Amino acid sequence: MPFDRRKFLKQSAVTGAGVAIAGGAGAPAAQAAGAAPARHGHHEKRYSLTVMGTTDLHGHVFNWDYFKNADYSDAAGNAQGLARISTLVNQVRKEKGRRNTLLLDAGDTIQGTPLTYYYAKVDPITAKGGPVHPMAKAMNAIGYDAAALGNHEFNYGIETLRRFEHQLDFPLLGANAVDAKTLKPAFAPYYMKRFQVPGAPPVKVAVLGLTNPGIAIWDKALVQGKLAFEGLEEQAAKWVPKLRSMGADIVVVSAHSGTSGTSSYGDQVPYVENAAANVARQVPGIDAILVGHAHLEIPELRVVNEKSGKTVVLSEPLCFAERLTLFDFELVFTRGRWQVESVKASLKDSRTVADDPRITKLLSKEHAKVVAYVNQVVGRATETLTTVEARYKDAPIIDLITKVQEDVVKAALAGTEYASLPVLAQASPFSRTSEIPAGDVTIRDLSGLYVYDNTLVAKLLTGAQVRAYLEFSAQYYVQTAPGAPVDVDKLTNAADRPDYNYDYVSGLSYDIDIAQPAGSRIKNLSFGGAPLDDAARFVFAVNNYRANGGGAFPYVAAAQELWSESTEIRTRIAEWVTAKGVLDPKDFASVDWKLTRAGTPVF
């Protein structure tokens, strides 16, 4: 039965605090007929509950790499996919008893692989009589109880998200995702389930869902004026006491927010992006937090609440269904109520099991369709192009992205007052392993180059702003003295600044002097063979993540927007290659920048 959000929110409005969804091995009626509370002494009642959690599934159903057209593999030997998670979940349910378990997710479900793209854009779930989303099919079959909204849930627009929500047999939670006009919850804020205990009152477990405030920036074009996203800390402080007053014995938060306390969007939003540990510290009454968003593996993190002095247990099960978190709760019935005696968290690893054949069979048709789609040939490459060295050398494969963006923006602005301005473009080395082999070029090859569903925006920047933008980007490199040995694996600050937050800018010529401190690294910056004029005006072709403030690059978010579109940059690249027929670096490659030390090239 699909989860009825409208009915839920209507009941929420009536109770003023939300509505408990009866579930588990018995509804509230069973409580009235149940045995009397246990007496103290020899018959002290105890109960063990296991809460399982996944996060950042990003469309991974199988242990399959659509970009390589092969089983997934990485250097660490990881395996991924919900079919593996299903096997792990079945093991836990068999060991603990299904009636003593709960299964949650912390968001970012419907974006991230060609599978999710296909069912959002090629054979969309929003079409009349359209398909059921493969992630809905898989998660329903596995028997999830609730999931928090991730920021990537909004990438394809609210209509696609609502359709996906309607196809689920469980609620999508987001207490801090509110209607922009009424500020009332736009999604179910929480979920509550009762667990029956023979001879004692049921154990009531509340799950509060919180999502990422950065959605207001990253998907501004899709949510502005419709939805607002408030801080996790303030919304947890509002909801946790309500859940406790409704009789929750355990409060678990499913938060699409990392633990670091940092933000990638500067000060544009007053809320913290990675706020899960802040919530644990600041809001009393929480027992455990399932952490998402940061794609980290955190088996167990213990945070002491500043107000209550109690320990909150956090866990983040990596991403892509590579791990499953287990929160093991021990409860004791004392003084007429259930008390949490202990919580411990641990991870189970998907590489230790095989796919659940039930899930494989259920989604084999959808998988086959997507494999056929991504293997369509759209052109021919004259030579192999790769991103292996793209983070420290100007690689032709990244120039392909900037060239496509320049061409699309020039065509879009033709005949406007901005048509005469020069167009610059940014692009990032998203992947360190992407390759377009010589010979046939497929959609799969091009999708592997541009893994995000970003769209294109044209902004107006001055020469001085472009210079500042480049200086900010150059912080990516570790300061390296002239003559010091160069280890390419230690050349970048990838831990603090991921590869996707380093930008090439095409149309200019410049050196990055990594012997200099951050802020004074851009040298010999020129345009059209002359030093860059700080007062000159440029059209800047930029992806929507960057245009809206992602990565906190200076000036670009506040700059005047000249044009934008909803077609993915990845699609534009495929169209460009299809139209050309041949992918030849002489049509797009240019050496715009190089790394130097005190004027001497590093490579």
Image: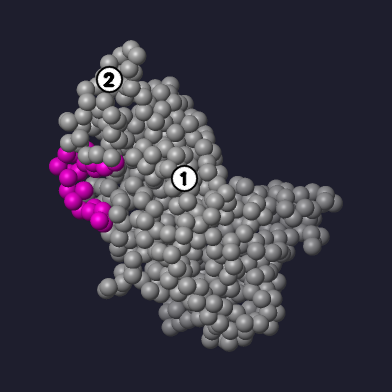
Q: Are there few (<14), some (14-19), or many (20+) residues within 10 Å of tag 1?
A: some
Is residue 122 among what the camera can see? yes
Question: Tag 2, which secondary structure?
Answer: loop
The residue lying toward the viewer, choosing from 482 and 328, is 328
The question of residue 10 being in magenta is answered with yes
The residue lying toward the viewer, choosing from 420 and 514, is 514
The residue lying toward the viewer, choosing from 224 and 534, is 224
Q: Residue furthest left?
A: 14
Position in image of residue 31 (x %, y %): 20, 32
**Residue placed under numbered mark 1 in the picture:** 91
**Residue placed under numbered mark 2 in the picture:** 38
The residue drawn where x is 62% and y is 47% is 495
Q: Residue furthest right?
A: 483
Position in image of residue 528 (x %, y %): 65, 75
The residue lying toward the viewer, choosing from 383 and 400, is 383
Image vertical order of residue 445 relative to residue 135, above or below: below
Position in image of residue 464 (x %, y %): 58, 60
Is residue 426 among what the camera can see? no
Residue type marked 1: Gln
Q: Are the two marked residues, 1 and 2, in contact with CB atoms closer than 8 angstroms?
A: no
**Stretch in magenta:** 1-24
Left or right placement of residue 513 versus residue 472 in this view:
right
Q: Are there few (<14), some (14-19), or many (20+) residues within 10 Å of tag 2?
A: many
